[in-house]
Image (cartoon, helix red, strand yellow):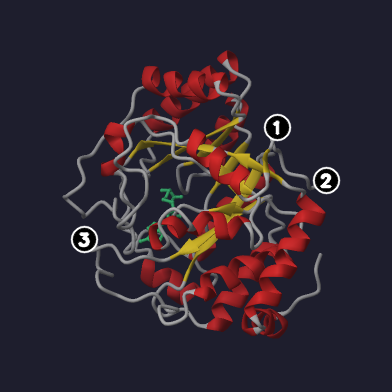
Amino acid sequence: MSLFNRQSVIELLQSPRDELFARADLVRADVMGDAVYLRGIVEFSNICANDCVYCGIRKSNRNPKRYRIDSTEIMDVAHRMQASGQTTIVLQSGEVATPKEDERIATIVRRIKAETSLAVTLSCGNRPRDTYAYWREAGMDRYLLRFETSDPDLFASLHPDCSLEDRLQCLRDLRSVGAQVGSGFMIGVPGETLEILADNILLCRDFDLDMIGIGPFIAHPDTPLAGQLNAYADDPDMYFAAVAALRIVNPDAHIPATTAFDAIWPHAGRDLVLQRGANVFMPNATPGKYRKSYMLYPDKPCVDEEDHLCAGCASARIWSIGRMIGTGPGHSIKHR
Ligand code: SAH
C-alpha cells in the first residue's frame, strides 16, 4: 500500500501539472501497460427510487421518459459486443430495490454468462449483502458503486436516501461475496475542499479497489444543484490532476477515462485522461433510442448516435494516441 497521507496528496494535486501528468502516465505504463480495456456500458433502466440531489435521473425529476430495456434487447447488445471482440459488459441502472427487480437482474446475468464469454459488471446501487450474493451466484464478476465523496456530512447533504456508512458497507459486502469491486467519486461537488479531494483519493486506496472511476461534477438543470459551479470551475486542470494523483496513489487499480470528461471537452477529454493515468474506456453500448433519457448530467456525449455500439469510435481514439485495445477479460491485476 502506498504511503501517502492527506498532506502529501494535496502536495501532489498542487504540484506543477506537466510533471504530475507525466509521472502518472509513467506509473500507468509501468504497472498496467499500454493496453486500454473496453467496458461497454448498457444503461438498461432509468427508473429510480432515490433522490440524489445531483443526478438527472433522480426520482423527483419528471422530465426523463422512464424506460426499462427488456432482456431480448440486452442480449442482442451482448451478442454484438461478443461478436465485435469486446470482453466486458457493464449493466447500469437507477435503483429499484425490489425482489422482482433483483430476480430480473439475476436472470439476465445468467443468460449473458451462458450465451457469451463476457465478463459481467453490475452497477445498480445499494443493496443488502444477500442480493449481492445472489447476483454473484448468478455469475456477476464485478460491481461498480461510487462512494461519491468521503466526507460524511457532504455525503448526507447529497443523498437523502442513504448515509456514507451504508454505502461503504455495500462495498465491504461486495468484496465479501467475491466480486471485484469498483468505486470512486465525483470531482468538485459544491462544498468539496482540497482536503476532501485528497481524502477521496486515500479512501480509494484504503478500500484497495480493483477499479476506480472518477469524473467532474456537472450541474444538471433539473436538479436542486442546477446552476451550481464545480468547486474547481476556475481551474479545470484540477479534474486531470485528480486522476493523475489517483493513479500515483493507486498504481495497480483499473482507472477508466470517464464519460463526464467528454462532456466538458468534447471528443478530447477522455483521450487526455488516458494520457494522464487512465487505462480503461467505457464506450456507450445503450441502444440509441434510450440515450436521451439517461442524462445524468448535461452534454453527455454520444446521445445522438444511431449505432448501438460506440466501441468502434473508442478504438480509433485509443489507436490515435498510440495505445492498443486490451484483449482478454481485463480482470483486476490485484492478487488476493
Ligand atoms: N444508480 C447507480 C448508477 C448511478 S449513475 C448508482 O448509484 O451507483 C453513475 C454515476 O454517475 C454516479 O455514481 C455519479 O458519480 C455520476 N453522476 C450522476 N450525476 C452526475 C452529475 N450531475 N455530474 C457528474 N457525475 C454524475
Which comes before the other along the chain, label 3 or label 2?
Answer: 3
Near-viewer residue (250 or 123): 250
Which mark's residue is nearer the viewer, 3 or 2? Answer: 3
The residues bearing labels 3 and 2 have C-alpha atoms spaced at a distance of 43 Å
Looking at the image, residue 209 sits to the left or right of residue 213; the answer is right
Outermost top residue = 115
| Secondary structure at numbered mark 1 | loop
- Tag 1: amino acid: Thr
Outermost left residue = 62
| Rendered residue at 52%/51% (across/down) | 145
Residue 233 % position (x, y) = 40, 78
Near-viewer residue (177 or 196): 196
The crowding category of the residue bearing disc 2, from other C-alpha atoms within 10 Å (few below 14, some 14 to 19, many at least 20), is few
The crowding category of the residue bearing disc 3, from other C-alpha atoms within 10 Å (few below 14, some 14 to 19, many at least 20), is many
The crowding category of the residue bearing disc 1, from other C-alpha atoms within 10 Å (few below 14, some 14 to 19, many at least 20), is few
| Rendered residue at 55%/23% (across/down) | 84
Q: Which residue is mark 2?
A: 335
Near-viewer residue (281 or 316): 316
Give the quadrant of residue 95. Answer: top left
Q: Are marks 3 and 2 in contact (CB under 8 Å)?
A: no
The residues bearing labels 1 and 2 have C-alpha atoms spaced at a distance of 20 Å
Residue 325 % position (x, y) = 66, 38
Q: Quadrant of the N terminus?
A: bottom right
Which mark's residue is nearer the viewer, 1 or 2? Answer: 1
Picture layout, residue 36 above or below residue 212: above
Q: Which residue is mark 3?
A: 222
Looking at the image, residue 132 sits to the left or right of residue 159; the answer is right
Which mark's residue is nearer the viewer, 3 or 1? Answer: 1
- Tag 2: amino acid: His
Q: Which residue is mark 1?
A: 327
| Rendered residue at 71%/38% (across/down) | 331
Which comes before the other along the chain, label 3 or label 1?
Answer: 3
